[in-house]
Structure formats: structure tokens, C-alpha cells
Amino acid sequence: MDINTIRGITTAILLVIFIGFIFWAFSKKRSKAFSEAELLPFDDDTIQQIKKKREVSSHE
């Protein structure tokens, strides 16, 4: 095995890992956790208002 074969195998492995991360990040199971995490910079009152708006708009 020469260095180019090792580089090719390493590239393929990293590509598979990257695609795995993409599927993990955009999976429906994670969307609730990510939507809650995006509200972390706001204070508690603002978070409650945003959650209420989302609940109202999702029920319509």
C-alpha cells in the first residue's frame, strides 16, 4: 500500500462520516432539540412568547 491508497481510503472514510453527520443533523428526531437550542440566547420571557407563537402557527 502506498501513500495515495491510504489517502484515498482516509478520504472515503471521512466522506462517509460527513454524510452521517448531515443525516444526523437534519433528522426529524433532532429537530425539536435543535429548535429549542436556537432559543437559548434569549431570556426566559422571550422564549415563552416565541414558543406560544410557534404553537399557535403550527395549529392553524
Image (tube, rainbow, N blue to C red):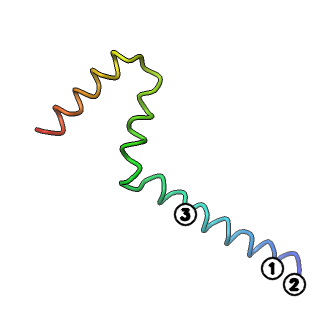
Q: Quadrant of residue 2?
A: bottom right
Three-letter amino acid code at the position of disc 2: Met
Work out how far the residue at label 3 is from the one at label 2, CA to CA, in angstroms: 26 Å
Q: Residue at x 42, y 20 (%)?
A: 42
Work out how far the residue at label 3 is from the one at label 1, CA to CA, in angstroms: 21 Å
Q: CB of mark 1 within 8 Å of CB of mark 2? A: yes
Label 2: element kind: loop
Residue 21 vertical placement versus 11 (above, below): above
Work out how far the residue at label 1 is from the one at label 2, CA to CA, in angstroms: 6 Å
Mark 3 and mark 1 lie on one chain; the one further toward the N terminus is: 1
Q: Residue at x 20, y 33 (%)?
A: 55
Mark 3 and mark 2 lie on one chain; the one further toward the N terminus is: 2
Q: Quadrant of residue 15?
A: bottom right
Three-letter amino acid code at the position of disc 3: Ile
Three-letter amino acid code at the position of disc 1: Thr
Q: Which residue is tagged 1? A: 5
How many marks the image carries: the answer is: 3
Image coordinates of residue 36 in percent, x first then y, are 39, 35
Q: Which residue is tagged 2? A: 1
Residue occupying the far right of the picture: 2
Judge the density around disc 3: few (<14), some (14-19), many (≥20) Cα neighbours within 10 Å: few
Image coordinates of residue 16 in percent, x first then y, are 60, 68
Q: Which residue is tagged 3? A: 19
Label 1: element kind: helix
